[in-house]
């Protein structure tokens, strides 16, 4: 324990394997010490790893998080590569994820790294496996809006002061990762009876964008770095997100515009998705009335997914990219509209 205390005094993230005895609520040390992230193992189906009749991942309420630990490819001295099983295979996955995360956000504390890894983890089929299965994309990008700023351990990554205009739109709130532009933009757990769309094992919160007569545009955006086009193994990558649109029934066609914009380092627009009201088929569910605007009765489309591919050769030089989702009016005065966004994902396929 003295060694652990010494390491913690030097801002060290400590990660330990939970053990392979298949025991429940039988703490395994040093993973079970306070201040150490204890890692259990799961298989490709997100079930607790069971390797044979005598060996399986330990589990219980003392586990912090889980990671893949069944048949991982590992180097074997003199033998090339082989399948590697165990929580000793799972723990390095978490270590690597923590290292990547800390390299992106070096001012975050060790407690903050643990918090982000847990909050962004995917839900599991089995119990006793901690917060969930590690999801490094979600930890870095927060596309399901599960990670929230906690100033004591996870600082805001601000690029502008609240209220300072960016692109002509005043920022009223800057959350962890995402920049929210416009006074009617927020991260919320629910909208009346409607909640996030649980997909990819995530069901945290969702982005909310609202436009009306006075506020013609709302936007969420995030910048990220691509160090090299060699980061992409395949010839294209996919961007997808889930959306639910609330609009006034009977309003004019093409009254609103939904855009997904990806800008590459030179500042030019790489892809611009345009969805007009003509593509928004209204669901017959009960319409929703906004509490502070009782005259705005909106019907919604229901959750649906949109995705598009970007060719690798279009990405060009490495550098900072910016991804934005924008809701705006096309007519003036325009009818009110609301947009929910969830499960934003980038996949290399």
Image (tube, rainbow, N blue to C red):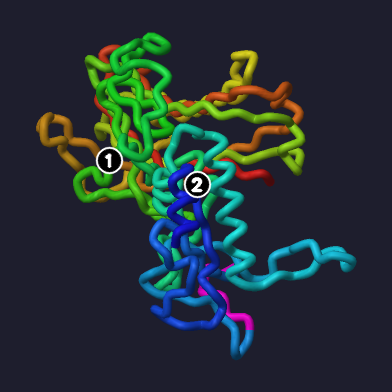
Q: Nearer the viewer, residue 122 or 304?
A: 122
Q: Position of residue 198 (x, y in %)?
A: 40, 55
Vertical order, 259 against 109 (above or below) = above
The percent position of residue 154, horizontal first and vertical second, equals: 37, 38
In the rendered image, which quarter is residue 291 located in? top left
Residue at the image point whose x is 24% and y is 21% from the top: 212
Residue 265: image tag: none
Q: Nearer the viewer, mark 1 or mark 2?
A: 2
Mark 2, Cα crowd under 10 Å, few <14 / some 14-19 / many 20+, is: some
| Numbered badge on residue 12 | 2
Q: CA distance from mark 1 to mark 2?
A: 33 Å
Residue that carries the numbered disc 1 in the rendered image:
188
Residue 209 or residue 112, whichever sits in front: 112
One can see residue 256 in this view: no
Residue ID at (76%, 39%): 235
Secondary structure mostly taken by the magenta-highlighted segment of the chain: loop
């Amino acid at each position: 324990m003295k060694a652990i205390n010494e390491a913690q005094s030097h801002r060290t993230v400590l990660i330990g394997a939970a053990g392979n005895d298949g025991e429940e609520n039988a703490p395994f040390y040093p993973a079970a010490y306070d201040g150490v992230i204890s890692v259990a193992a799961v298989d490709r189906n997100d079930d607790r790893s069971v390797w044979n009749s005598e060996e399986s991942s330990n589990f219980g309420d003392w586990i912090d998080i889980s990671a893949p630990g069944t048949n991982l490819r590992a180097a074997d001295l003199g033998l090339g590569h082989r399948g590697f099983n165990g929580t000793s295979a799972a723990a390095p996955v978490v270590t690597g994820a923590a290292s990547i995360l800390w390299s992106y956000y070096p001012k975050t504390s060790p407690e903050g790294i643990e918090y982000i890894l847990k909050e962004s983890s995917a839900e599991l089929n089995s119990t006793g496996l901690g917060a969930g299965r590690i999801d490094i994309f979600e930890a870095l990008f927060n596309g399901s809006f599960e990670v929230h700023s906690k100033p004591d351990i996870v600082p805001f990554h601000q690029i502008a002061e609240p209220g300072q205009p960016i692109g002509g739109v005043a920022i009223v709130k800057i959350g962890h990762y995402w920049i929210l532009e416009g006074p009617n933009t927020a991260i919320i757990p629910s909208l009346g009876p409607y909640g996030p769309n649980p997909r990819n094992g995530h069901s945290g919160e969702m982005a909310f964008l609202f436009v009306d007569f006075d506020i013609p545009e709302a936007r969420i955006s995030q910048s990220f770095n691509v160090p090299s086009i060699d980061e992409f193994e395949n010839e294209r990558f996919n961007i997808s997100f889930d959306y639910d649109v609330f609009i006034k029934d009977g309003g004019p066609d093409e009254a609103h515009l939904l855009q997904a914009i990806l800008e590459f380092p030179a500042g030019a627009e790489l892809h611009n998705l345009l969805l007009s009201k003509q593509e928004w088929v209204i669901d017959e569910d009960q319409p929703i009335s906004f509490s502070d605007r009782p005259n705005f009765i909106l019907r919604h489309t229901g959750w649906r997914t949109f995705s598009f591919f970007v060719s690798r050769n279009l990405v060009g030089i490495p550098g900072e990219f910016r991804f934005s989702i924008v809701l705006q009016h096309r007519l003036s005065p325009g009818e009110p509209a609301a947009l929910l966004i969830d499960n934003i994902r980038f996949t290399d396929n």
